[in-house]
Image (cartoon, grey):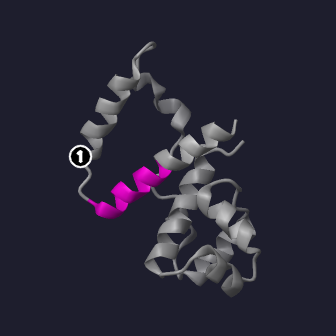
Amino acid sequence: MTSPRSICVGSALSDKMIAANLNADQLARMVELEPMHVHDLESGKAIMNIDELFIFSEFFDCPVSDFFIGLYDFGKHNEDFIAGVTDEFFEKYLLTYFRKIPDPLMKRLMCSIVRQTAEMDKEK
């Protein structure tokens, strides 16, 4: 099972690829990794190891910490929700706060996280 941390790190990789106008195959060739593995990293299906983290950090000329910005322990933030809330409540909650995000890139990241999480749950 993929952890939420993998998804966030993968989303950061995806954002950097989009900014550089690269797809997984192109990036894989440039950093000498398997294309499917880069795709799995980007989608959060694989966990990025420290060597890969440094490879991508050097390639994109960014600090390693760029891959972890905004990452936190999801398990510690469940107290916002009482037991038994409905899907309708969650949808309204998400939409209310989503509309308050001013940065389009951050909105895309949030959509990507939701999509990837739904796809992970589908695989179970």
Q: Where 24 sits versus 8, above or below?
A: below
- Crowd band around label 1 with a 10 angstrom C-alpha radius: few (<14), some (14–19), many (20+): few
Q: Position of residue 107 (x, y in %)?
A: 34, 55
**From which residue to which does the magenta span run?**
103-113
Name the element at disc 1.
Answer: loop
Q: Position of residue 98 (x, y in %)?
A: 29, 45
Q: Position of residue 55 (x, y in %)?
A: 67, 77
Magenta residues, dominant SS class: helix
Picture residue at 45% right of the left edge, 13% below the top: 83
Callout 1, which amino acid?
A: Arg
Picture residue at 62% right of the left edge, 38% below the top: 122
Asked whether 109 falls inside the magenta stretch, the response is yes
Q: Where 120 sits versus 24, above or below?
A: above
Front-most of residues 85 and 88: 88
Picture residue at 58% right of the left edge, 52% below the top: 7
Instruction: Report whether 78 appears left or right of 30.
Output: left
Q: Which residue is mark 1?
A: 99
Residue 17 in sight here: yes
- Give the position of the C terminus as an image quadrant: top right
